[in-house]
Amino acid sequence: MFHRLPLFASLLGAGALTLGLTGPGSFASFTSTVAGTNSIASGSFQLEAFPSGPPSVSGPLIWAANSTGQPVHSLTASSEPTPAVTGEGNTLSYSLANANPGDTYTYQFNVGDTGTLQGQVDTISYQTDPSVSAQALENQMTVQVQEDLNGTWTDIHNNSNDGSAGVAETAAGNWTYYLDYGFGPAFLQPGFTFDANGNPTNCTGNACTESTATFRVVFTFLNPTTNPNSQNGNTVSQNAVEGLSAAPTITINGTNTP
């Protein structure tokens, strides 16, 4: 991520100037030099992610009895690395406990550019947790990534850059979500400061529209059985993932656009 800056170098070369006779058959010359210094500073493209509101959960049994035993989840963001590492953003951490078959879990976040160069979000990568126990749980879940486009949550197409619609995929696989073609990359303008929710605090007018991009990740815990009391294969498979955990990752990838 480099930005070409105009380089102005002023170099005055040494020259010989005949000033006059100093004696029979001899001349005296003065020479002069001027040093030119150059100051070149590259720009930076620095993504930062912010939670945008609390995570949400939906399902047939949510709050059906009382708060005991309900899903508990949170979304937090770390600060920028210290000392700052150019190009390396911060980290979002999504934590979910008491996941339950049949429920859907959603968290959303804003992404801004705290550097000095404008840029864009090109892709979002989902990487599964490859451990055996995690895969057992992830196989019972789906994942999808969406962007808020003019107030409408829109599925980002995955594993294809031809503009096809995105769909929910198994959380046990690796997926790349492309923001290109008709969907369009998420352009970000630099130089903004943000509040705790990733909302710009120093923009006005049209500048605000490209200060951040808003995304959300949706996990659904599948419930393939229609009768939870039936002793069939689905119930056995479902019960086999009780007490398991997984740690898949989401990575937001961007480039500067000078």
Image (tube, rainbow, N blue to C red):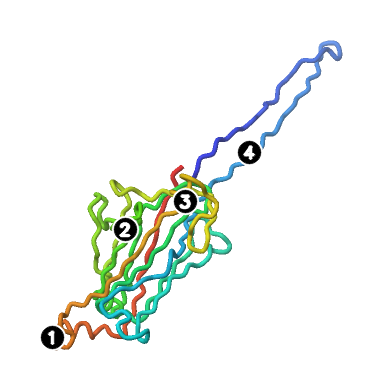
Q: Position of residue 17 (x, y in %)?
A: 75, 17
Question: What numbered label is drawn on residue 153?
Answer: 2
Residue located at (26% from left, 73% from top): 141
Q: In screen coordinates, is 233 left or right of 30? A: left
Q: CA distance from mark 1 to mark 4?
A: 76 Å
Q: Residue furthest top?
A: 24
In front of the other: label 3 or label 4?
3
Amino acid marked by disc 3: Ser
* Residue 40, above or below 16: below
Q: Position of residue 232 (x, y in %)?
A: 13, 85
In front of the other: label 2 or label 4?
2
Question: What numbered label is drawn on residue 211?
Answer: 3
N-terminal label among 3 and 4: 4
Residue designated by label 1 = 232
Q: In screen coordinates, is 21 left or right of 57? A: right
In front of the other: label 1 or label 2?
2
Q: Is there a contact, CB below 8 Å, between mark 3 and mark 4? A: no
Q: CA distance from mark 1 to mark 3?
A: 52 Å
Q: CA distance from mark 2 to mark 3?
A: 18 Å
Amino acid marked by disc 2: Trp
N-terminal label among 1 and 3: 3
Q: Residues within 10 Å of mark 4 (few under 14, many from 20)?
A: few
N-terminal label among 1 and 2: 2
Residue 153 quadrant: bottom left
Q: Residues within 10 Å of mark 2 (few under 14, many from 20)?
A: some
Residue located at (31% from left, 69% from top): 128
Residue designated by label 4 = 38
Q: Position of residue 142 (x, y in %)?
A: 26, 69
Residue located at (30% from left, 59% from top): 176
Q: Secondary structure at mark 4?
A: loop
Q: CA distance from mark 1 to mark 2?
A: 37 Å
User: Closest to the observer: 66 or 117?
Assistant: 66
